[in-house]
Image (spheres, rainbow, N blue to C red):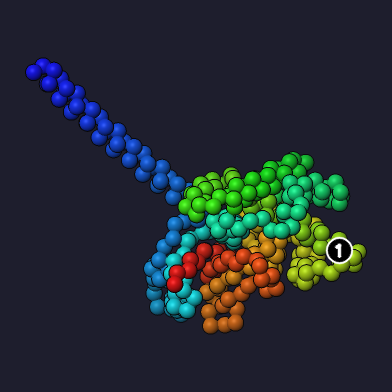
Amino acid sequence: MLSMSFLTALFWYCRRLYSFLAQLLKRWSNYLQRQLIRNLSVLPEVDLLGYSAREWKGETQQAKQMREAYEELFRSCHIKYLRQVRRDNYSVVRAVLFQIFSQGIPFPLWMKERDILKLPEKLLYSQGCNWIQQYSFGPERYTGPNAFGKLRKCMEALKTNWAEISTTRDHEERGSMCNTLFSDESKEYKLYEAIKFIMLYEAVEAYEQIKSRDEPVHNLFSLLFARDSSSDPLSFMMNHLNSIGDSICLDQVELFLLGYLLQVKIRVYRLHRFNTEEFQINYPDEYRREWNEISLLTEDDRYYHIPLFRM
């Protein structure tokens, strides 16, 4: 009888302990999940029309037009959901890179042929662009001799994460890796600065070709250098790239350049241009058939979200 009582008491105690530990683990898991969602720079998907109704209440002309634009996306474009992207000056680069990673899109062909880790060294030493020491890293407006080392670390972060995620075949695992990466500001900012630097590198290459007249360059570079504020690579860096992530975001010409260098067709739904020919625009407008396509949604050409299609 004593043995039976002891075993019964032990069983009851273990059961209570197991229940307590299970509840504790569940609470900890929920806490970690809430923290992850709070830190995510690309939020989980939400219903498109529900988002429109919440964001554009009222009967002003602008609110009515926005709701109509969202309804058109739902009805004609089969966009049923969207993922909100953090509203900062990295918004468009974040939205583009998140889709490239989450879809498992591989490196562009030119990145496979060249080692992008060597681009800062090539620009500084081979092409004599010592002015890259004036490069600014978004909100961290730091310039000086350490710029080269910081750029190298940014390029390493881009190459490592892109290679790891793009070779992950399981969709859910890839999505989990993206959520982890895009909830760590210090890591994701390195990716965006690497993309900015690649844009600068491509601008330098094109500018040298234009001066030497060795071979024709894409017409987007003619548009880029036609601006008074970016007549050459140095002014492009100082007046545009250095402020991206800090006080400005990419403009239309730079979106063309972004799609061109990443070799993706970026289709943008511009809701503030609803009922005009500029409602849908492709960046770049000239693209190769084999390029992957990603889509963005914007209400103001400043902040961007990710539309999700469902039939």
- For the N terminus, the quadrant is top left
19 left or right of 227 in image:
left
Residue under the point 81% across and 63% down: 206
* Whole-percent x, y for residue 283 in the image: 65, 70
26 left or right of 130 in image:
left
Determine whether the residue tagged by mark 1 lies in a helix, strand or loop.
helix
Residue under the point 12% across and 21% down: 4
Question: Quick one: 65 or 95, which is closer to the camera?
Answer: 95
Q: Residue at label 1? A: 209
* Whole-percent x, y for residue 164 in the image: 60, 47
Give the residue type that dot 1 points to. Gln
Q: Quadrant of residue 229?
A: bottom right
- For the C terminus, the quadrant is bottom left
* Whole-percent x, y for residue 238 in the image: 75, 56
The residue carrying pointer 1 sits among few (fewer than 14), some (14 to 19) or many (20 or more) residues within 10 Å by Cα, namely: some
Q: Is residue 228 visible?
A: no
Looking at the picture, does residue 50 appear above or below residue 182?
below
Q: Is residue 59 visible?
A: yes
Looking at the picture, does residue 229 appear above or below residue 111?
below
Residue under the point 55% across and 58% down: 103
Question: Quick one: 173 or 1, which is closer to the camera?
Answer: 1
Query: How many numbered callouts?
Result: 1
Question: Quick one: 99 or 90, which is closer to the camera?
Answer: 99
Q: In which quarter of the image is residue 256?
A: bottom right
Residue under the point 76% across and 43% down: 148
